[in-house]
Image (cartoon, rainbow, N blue to C red):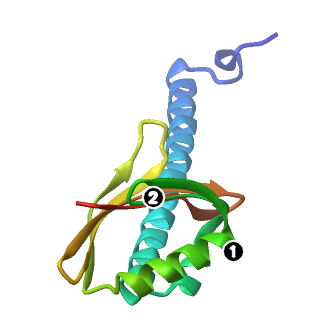
Amino acid sequence: MQSVAQFWPHNKVAMKVNKYISSVVFALISFHAVSVMAQSNDVISQVKETIKAGSAKELSKYLNQTVDVTIDDKVESYSKAQAEFIFRDFFKQHPANEFNIIHQGQSKGGQPFAIGQYKSGTETHRVFMKIKTVGNQQLVHEISFVKE
């Protein structure tokens, strides 16, 4: 088998080609990572607006088919439709005065997450959500509202 250097008379040319190929691969990987981050930021901002509005129906559009929901100390896994009813009741009992995302990022494995603060009357809930890529969509896989 012939080496790359045999096709090009100078090793400098082969090194430039390798460097160029490496740069293109790095750029493609970087573009993909930025694209995934932009999608997760977009989903988080959309979820933020639906929670602010207290709309369980709109929130359900961003939920995975199965979602882990924590309301105070009760942790359950629900279907998307069941979770919509749970959030409808929660928003009815605790109408939003204010909701803000106070931190967002990614786990070491690259899973996006966000932490927020939900205020209703005199109560404040800490909100935590994990985003998961399903197919080509970013969806909420886990969400919790825990009273502070």
Q: Is residue 37 visible?
A: yes
Q: Residues within 10 Å of mark 1 (few under 14, many from 20)?
A: some
Mark whose residue sits in front, 1 or 2: 1
Residue at the farthest left position: 122
- Front-most of 97 and 109? 97
Of residue 48 and residue 1, the one placed in the foreground of this image is: 48
Whether residue 60 sits left or right of residue 87 in the image: it is right
Residue 9 x, y percent position in the rendering: 62, 20
Using residue 123 as the reference point, say whether residue 111 is left or right of it: right
Q: In the rendered image, which quarter is residue 77 located in?
A: bottom right
Q: Sequence-wise, which precedes: disc 1 or disc 2?
A: 2
Amino acid type shown at disc 1: Ala
Name the residue that disc number 2 marks: 37
Residue in the foreground of this view, choosing between 10 and 114: 114
CA gap, disc 1 and disc 2: 27 Å
Q: Give the camera-side residue of 83 and 8.
A: 83
**Label 1 sits on residue:** 81
The structure residue drawn at horizontal position 28% and vertical position 66%, both measured from the top left corner, is: 125
Q: Quadrant of residue 58?
A: bottom right
Q: Quadrant of the N terminus?
A: top right
Specify the farthest residue to the top.
1
144 sits left or right of 77 in the view? left
- The type of residue carrying mark 2 is Met
Residue placed at 46% from the left, 72% from the top? 42
Residue 49's x, y, as percent? 40, 83
Using the rendered view, name the quadrant where residue 95 is placed: bottom left
Q: Residue at x 54, y 46 (%)?
A: 29
